[in-house]
């Protein structure tokens, strides 16, 4: 049995090193300790940058807004069903398909964030009716990513509006659950969709890791 680390293992280790360094820089008053945490953060940036084919400087710039105690980021996604078909958007950056959604902004509640994202990406007004689950992105087959992310799925009900493409999307459509388009795996994986729909149409409790 090989003990060689996978790219996913290395990415997770680098995430953890970066988080330890960020939290240490937040709470450590000692000059020498801060130097050690800065060095530790540089190691994490080097590891992550190598994995994503970026320069360490470019990667550090991506993290400039991160300070304080390090915690996972929160991503919200909506399951909207119309006549048994699932609402999906084709992402402009990779041409692949995902559930409407995105990052939760500071100051937003999760339900506020998902209503905004659905409206911006699809033109539909929705209300949130059920939490379907919370997934740890590192555990479900997503490609490696610089940040540790919790992905949350909500069942949403249409209230009105008209389908329209945003600047972030190439297309919008409702799809048969058994015939989904090619997925943007950075954003969503089939397991999360199918588990979410199963919970949406049943009395099963929300999924969580």
Image: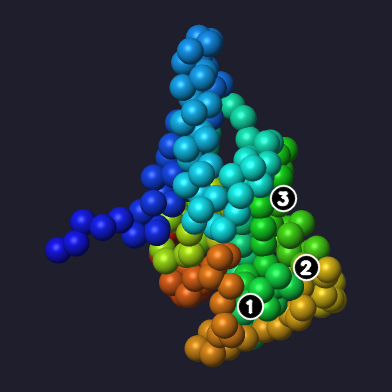
Label 1 with label 2: CB-CB less than 8 Å:
no
Left or right: 156 as drawn, with respect to 7? right
Q: Nearer the viewer, residue 176 or 126?
A: 176
* Tag 1 residue: 96
Q: Residues within 10 Å of mark 2 (few under 14, many from 20)?
A: few
Q: Residue at x 80, y 63 (%)?
A: 120
Q: Residues within 10 Å of mark 1 (few under 14, many from 20)?
A: some
**Mark 3: secondary structure:** helix
Residue 22 x, y percent position in the rendering = 53, 30
Q: Residue furthest left?
A: 1
Q: Nearer the viewer, mark 3 or mark 2?
A: 2
Left or right: 154 as drawn, with respect to 44? right
Label 3 with label 2: CB-CB less than 8 Å:
no
Numbered circle sitting on residue 112: 3
Compare marks 1 and 3 and give the one earlier in the sequence.
1
Q: Nearer the viewer, residue 39 or 102?
A: 39
Q: Examine the rendered structure and indicate whether residue 179 appears above or below residue 165.
A: below
Q: Residue furthest top?
A: 30
**Mark 1: secondary structure:** loop
- The number of numbered discs placed on residues in the rendered structure image is 3
Q: CA distance from mark 1 to mark 2?
A: 12 Å
Q: Residues within 10 Å of mark 3 (few under 14, many from 20)?
A: some
Q: CA distance from mark 1 to mark 3?
A: 25 Å
Compare marks 3 and 2 and give the one earlier in the sequence.
3
Residue 155 x, y percent position in the rendering = 59, 65
* Tag 2 residue: 168
Residue 43 x, y percent position in the rendering = 47, 38
Q: Would you say residue 142 is visible in this rendering?
A: yes
């Amino acid at each position: 049995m090989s003990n060689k680390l996978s790219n996913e293992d290395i990415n997770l280790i680098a995430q953890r090193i970066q988080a330890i360094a960020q939290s240490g820089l937040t709470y450590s008053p000692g000059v020498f300790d801060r130097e050690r945490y800065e060095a530790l953060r540089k190691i994490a940036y080097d590891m992550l940058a190598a994995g994503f084919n970026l320069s360490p400087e470019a990667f550090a710039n991506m993290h400039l807004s991160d300070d304080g105690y390090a915690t996972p980021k929160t991503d919200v996604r909506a399951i909207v069903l119309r006549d048994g078909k699932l609402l999906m958007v084709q992402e402009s950056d990779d041409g692949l398909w995902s559930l409407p959604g995105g990052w939760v902004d500071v100051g937003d509640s999760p339900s506020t964030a998902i209503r905004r994202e659905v409206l911006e990406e699809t033109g539909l007004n929705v209300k949130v009716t059920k939490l379907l689950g919370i997934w740890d992105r590192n555990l479900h087959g997503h490609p490696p990513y610089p940040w540790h992310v919790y992905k949350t799925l909500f069942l949403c009900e249409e209230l009105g509006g008209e389908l329209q493409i945003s600047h972030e999307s190439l297309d919008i459509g409702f799809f048969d659950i058994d015939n989904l388009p090619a997925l943007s795996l950075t954003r969503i994986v089939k397991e999360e969709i199918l588990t979410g729909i199963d919970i949406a149409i049943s009395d099963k409790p929300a999924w969580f890791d």
